Image (tube, rainbow, N blue to C red):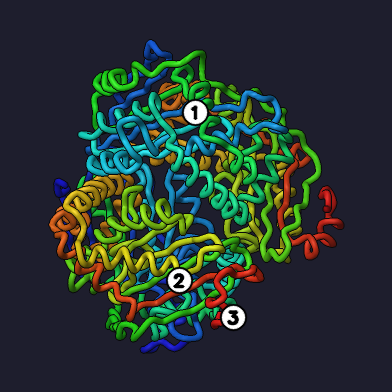
Amino acid sequence: MSAPTTHRSAEEIGRTELGPRPFPELGEQRAAADLASVDTVLTNGLRVIAVRRSSVPLVEVRLRIPFADPAASTVGSTHAARAEVLANTVLTGTAGRSRVDVDTELALVGGELDATVDPERLALSGNALVSGLDTVLDVLRDALTGATYPAEEVDRERARLVERIRLARSQPNVIAREALQRHLYGDHPFAKEMPEAEEVAAVTRDDVLALHASAVLPRGSVLVVVGDVEPDAAVRAVENALGGWGGEGAARTLSPLPVVQGGNVLLVHRPGAVQSQIRLAGRGLVRTDPRYPALQIANLVFGGFFSSRLVENIREDKGYTYSARSHPEFTPGGAALLVDADTASEVTAAALLETRYELGRLGLVPPSESEVDTARRYAIGSLLTATSSQGGLASFLVNLAGLGLGIEWFTGHPDRLAGVTVDEVAAAALEFFAPSAFTGVLVGDADLLAPQLRSLGGVTLP
Amino acid sequence: MALPELHRFTLPNGLRVVLAPDPSAPVVGVSVHYDVGFRSEPEGRTGFAHLFEHLMFQGSESLEKLAHFRHVQSSGGTFNGSTHPDYTDYYQVLPSAALERALFLEADRMRAPKLTEENLRNQIDVVKEEIRLNVLNRPYGGFPWILLPPVLFQTFPNAHNGYGDFTDLENATVDDCAAFFDTYYAPGNAVLTVAGDFEPDVAKGLVEKHFGDVPARPVPTRPSFAEAPPKGEQRAYHSDKHAPMPAIALGYRIPDPVAEVEGYLAYLVLAGVLTDGDGSRLQQRLVHRDALVVDVGAGCGLFGPLEARDPDTFSVTAIHPPDVTSEQVIAAVDEELLRLAEEGPSEQELAKVTARWVSTMHREHDRLTSRTLGLGSAELLFGRAELLYELPEKLAAITTDEVAAAAKALRPDSRAVLILNPAGADAGDASDNGGTE
């Protein structure tokens, strides 16, 4: 490449007369303002958490309704399909509002609302200018207590859902996730994140109405409101809008999952793939476990952020991957540790080898004082930055609420992290990061991968 | 939207600085936008601007390899960089106690990055993995941002693939890096933005302390990338071996966002009228009424609105089932555009789009990363960080006639049509087969 003028050499560019300079110390950290909040339960059983954060004149709303399949196994169950059709049509009509009316009313207050479902919960999430809070809550009330599931909307969304499922299942990331969940949890409803197309095609409007009546329930559900609004006033607004939402019994939560056991990695063939998805899983800890903060730090040092052993090894040293990471996933009654990396076919086996090596090394050459401090400061700081916006805080709180926790867990966590010792991190690393404690799946072109993976071992080939 | 306080000054070496204090949360964002993107990379070096962005994280005079990441993260912060058609940005968002550290890190690599053969080879491998992840190994990879420009544009800067092809990436040398840095990464070719919780005077002192002795270098003359709009309808076909369904992208030229910002914003409103929300024109017609497509979207700029200089793109994209032909989709889009051109949108349609934009602007402002980057790119491209805060008002001032005129200007006889077909699938649309791929 020719530059328009002459230029310095790379060596000349990389040094100055003064030479390297000292890295500045941290300045003084101002504490985050105390968050005014209310956490209460309405008479219909709906838990409401309202938090004032007045940085911008908006309000964020997150409703979480536990929405588990009542069956113990997905074999023969059509719950996932009915739940998907419900989520895609719950906001498409009520006695007083058409789908377009809903969109128009929300848009005029700068608002949005959408519904999504997964094996654990139905979520209705939205936001608006703060002046539109009552509008959002009224649309929510209307849908929760009077969704009519217009036949033409059910027909169209069902057809569209079949197409969307087909699109989703062409994504390597989705293929890997579905294979991993099946491998870990078999027929447990938690593993079925997407229904089959033919199950969706068989769902009727009556099925959806019946599911709504039996499962869209306030008791056991939680609504989080974060924004430029007084918490008491927000709770009153919620009570006015949703106080009349009722129903028999409580929203259904999932039964606990089997604990993840170590074992072989299952190779899933994806013909023509030029890159493979490595997805490993081991047992984790719930957020309330006294050892959780130590495990959180051990996980960060392993692969939980960029300055981790895994990223520095397989990305920054060897160039095997663009993205490698490990992270906890909180599951019904427990938790898993997940390790993900996507690597070119030629280096997949080598990347798996290095990943196992780093798993073993974390227990045997435990995180140093400096590694622990870096991870600890990252954990505390990133909690602060991730929750510094209304939307970030609302999403964080609704996830905590789904685990039965409240804002006290959030405000108390920095102190728990500060108290973790190097020995506690070493103990968590040794117990939870043993290579033998992990299993998983690997999606890629088996024709290319098989010889190396067979040689490496610990992989079940197709 | 109330205008937050902005402070701006220029250092003697030419570095432009924007300070946007806001004490609502004890966090701070720092970004540097360099006025060079992938439109400036030469032929034979596609993907170089992005590759070079990776190299800027690999160490500098005071920082060993990996030190940048460790310093940011051990200060409790996050970081990233991204390469756009006309600029490259770098940022850190951290607890406010770490402000000086972030300034130090950006200044050190602006002054003296370490460009080594070992790091270059390592990052070529990493970038190739990034391209496999985002393009080669997935359905609809690069659709439409890599696939549409070569149909809409004729000249290399506008048409080529900004991720680069593997051969070009592998041919990159350390000397290329040195030339690129010396040419484009001069302080006078950059904007530094600091947003969040700090005292302006203190921040100004720290900026001067750390960036003041970055030596001034000549600032390259920015070339014009202008080219004539397409004559006629330009069609191309792409076959995607991972895609389960066909897709279509229509590309149009729109006014220069810098020279005619109001003219440009009419297209932003038009995009909202067409595809924002269930009640929008194309959602109603294509998704719900005629059931032609699974999803449809429209927008200004292939990286988002106001993210590039002229020439910029308006695109309409849709994924559709194989039993629907691309001609059916195009015909329905054209009919809706014609109807809008003749009758214009209603006042209520514009009110919906405007209110959602006001809300979106507030939400972007509330996320420190997007606020910092938005102020920096507006300052770099438009010379006006304030533009970010003026947008709601400017959008509200767009009239139904202006939106009708924008719809009318999206002409079938001056556009690009990209048709993506699943490879090896029985295409339902026989007329679409046999094109160049």
Q: Which mark is residue A368?
A: none
Residue A402 versus residue A360 in the image, above or below? above
Foreground: B315 or A282? B315
Q: Residue at x 39, y 41 (%)?
A: A385
Image coordinates of residue A377 in percent, x first then y, are 47, 39
Q: Which mark is residue B327?
A: 2
Is B82 positioned to the left or the right of B166 in the image?
left
Separation of residues labelled 2 and 3 (CA atoms): 36 Å
Q: Is residue B215 visible?
A: no
Q: Is residue A70 visible?
A: yes
Instruction: Give the chain of mark 2.
Output: B
Image coordinates of residue A187 in percent, x first then y, are 72, 33
Separation of residues labelled 2 and 1 (CA atoms): 38 Å
Q: Residue at x 49, y 22 (%)?
A: A213
Q: Amino acid at mark 3?
A: Thr
Q: Residue at x 48, y 36 (%)?
A: A87
Label 1 sits on a secondary structure element that is: helix
Q: Amino acid at mark 1?
A: Leu
Q: Nearer the viewer, mark 2 or mark 3?
A: 2
Image coordinates of residue A117 in percent, x first then y, are 51, 36
Q: Which residue is mark 1?
A: A209
Q: Amino acid at mark 2?
A: Glu
Answer whether labels 2 and 1 touch (C-beta < 8 Å): no
Image coordinates of residue B175 in percent, x first then y, are 50, 82
Q: N-terminal of the two: label 2 or label 3?
A: 3
Answer whether labels 2 and 3 touch (C-beta < 8 Å): no
Label 3 sits on a secondary structure element that is: helix
Q: Residue at x 67, y 62 (%)?
A: A275
Q: Which residue is mark 3?
A: B167
Is B206 positioned to the left or the right of B185 in the image?
left
